[in-house]
């Protein structure tokens, strides 16, 4: 009889805990949800975050706030997210550089990407464009390479920060074409592009979303796309690979939450993000700026992260790239 009573009470306790857990998930979120970005406003990743922000807020039933924390190539923002409460109310939205390059670039990060983050989803793959100042006397990639070889001084290229994909794209472009270029790092895409437009820098490699509006206004020139195929929204723009065989660079954006976030909460966040990315109006807006929505599962993103980190870590080490 005693054993039966003990078993009954244990079963009641277990049921009560399940109800509490279920109620907690149903209550989530209980306050505004932050999306932390490690770059200033105006860049491609910031544009995409603000594009999905209103619909994500509707789905979650709470305000969604985009919080820009620029500095150290995204390290400051990622550190803030890593140290946030693991309750689902903080999401880090980062780039390939944040997740897969920085661990090799910075030997003593204040956080461990593998141990302090739970992958949520690969949000999108992102087309880059080689932009130049309109006064650069080159309208094609071969003309740009010829101009660089004839110039008495190295051409300059800007980036959103040392070790990020815009930086690595420029280093790769110089290496495969046998030219010398000087890297000028900035704290974000917006100031990087601004100095290309003003003529302080010759060129940059950046997300289509960050510069395409300036191409339309005549303040930037788009020479080529960095991906393996032409852009759907700009089919007249060639790829770099068409004149430089084998050249291919594709960026991506991904979301992660602090390690320890309850799995049910992770599932809810993923479901809401995937729902937003599947909306026709959101897909259309993203594709129009060279950004392909993905919405992979947490497990798929985790595997993808491992492969990307191995690949780009090797590039950083072999090229001996250091933070400026």
Image: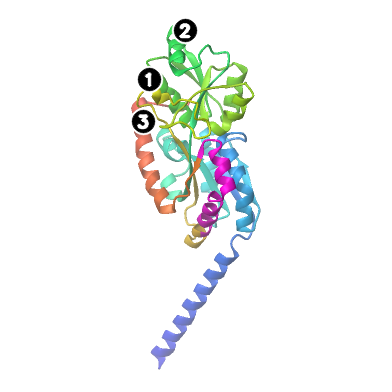
Q: Which image quadrant for residue 169?
A: top left
Looking at the picture, the colour scheme in use is rainbow
For marks 2 and 3, the one nearer the N-term is 2
The crowding category of the residue bearing disc 3, from other C-alpha atoms within 10 Å (few below 14, some 14 to 19, many at least 20), is: some
Q: Residue furthest front?
A: 236
Q: Which of 165 and 75 lies nearest the eye of the viewer?
A: 165
Q: Residue at x 64, y 24 (%)?
A: 217
| Residue numbers of the magenta segment | 268-291
Judging by the rendered image, the residue that carries numbered circle 2 is: 151
Judging by the rendered image, the residue that carries numbered circle 3 is: 315
Q: Which of 72 and 127 lies nearest the eye of the viewer?
A: 127
Q: Residue furthest right?
A: 63
Name the spot of residue 155 as percent of width and height, x first: 49, 14
Q: Residue at x 38, y 39 (%)?
A: 309
Judging by the rendered image, the residue that carries numbered circle 1 is: 175
Q: Quadrant of the N terminus?
A: bottom left
Q: Residue at x 42, y 48 (%)?
A: 301
In what element is the residue under mark 2?
loop
Horizontally, residue 78 falls left or right of residue 179, namely right
In what element is the residue under mark 1?
helix
C-alpha separation, residue under disc 3 versus residue under disc 1: 13 Å
């Amino acid at each position: 009889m005693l054993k039966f009573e003990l078993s009954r009470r244990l079963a009641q306790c277990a049921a009560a805990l399940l109800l509490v857990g279920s109620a907690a998930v149903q209550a989530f979120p209980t306050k505004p949800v932050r999306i932390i970005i490690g770059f200033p406003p105006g860049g491609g990743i910031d544009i995409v975050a603000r594009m999905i922000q209103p619909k994500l807020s509707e789905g979650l039933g709470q305000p969604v706030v985009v919080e820009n924390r620029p500095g150290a190539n995204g390290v400051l923002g990622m550190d803030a997210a890593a140290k946030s409460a693991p309750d689902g109310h903080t999401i880090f939205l980062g780039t390939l550089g944040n997740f897969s390059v920085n661990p090799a670039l910075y030997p003593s990060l204040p956080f461990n990407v593998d141990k302090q983050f739970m992958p949520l989803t690969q949000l999108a793959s992102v087309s880059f464009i080689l932009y130049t100042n309109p006064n650069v006397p080159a309208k094609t990639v071969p003309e740009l390479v010829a101009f660089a070889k004839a110039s008495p001084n190295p051409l300059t290229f800007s980036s959103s920060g040392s070790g990020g994909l815009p930086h690595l794209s420029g280093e790769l472009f110089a290496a495969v074409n046998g030219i010398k270029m000087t890297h000028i790092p900035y704290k974000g895409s917006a100031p990087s592009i601004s100095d290309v437009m003003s003529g302080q820098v010759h060129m940059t490699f950046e997300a289509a979303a960050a510069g395409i509006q300036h191409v339309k206004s005549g303040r930037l020139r788009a020479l080529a796309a960095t991906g393996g195929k032409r852009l759907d929204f700009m089919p007249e723009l060639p790829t770099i690979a068409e004149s430089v065989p084998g050249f291919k660079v594709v960026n991506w954006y991904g979301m992660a939450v602090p390690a320890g976030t309850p799995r049910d909460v992770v599932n809810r966040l993923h479901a809401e993000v995937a729902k937003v990315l599947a909306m026709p109006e959101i897909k259309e807006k993203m594709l129009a700026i060279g950004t392909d929505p993905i919405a992979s599962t947490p497990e798929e993103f985790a595997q993808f992260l491992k492969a990307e980190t191995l690949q780009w870590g090797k590039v950083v080490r072999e090229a001996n790239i250091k933070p400026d």
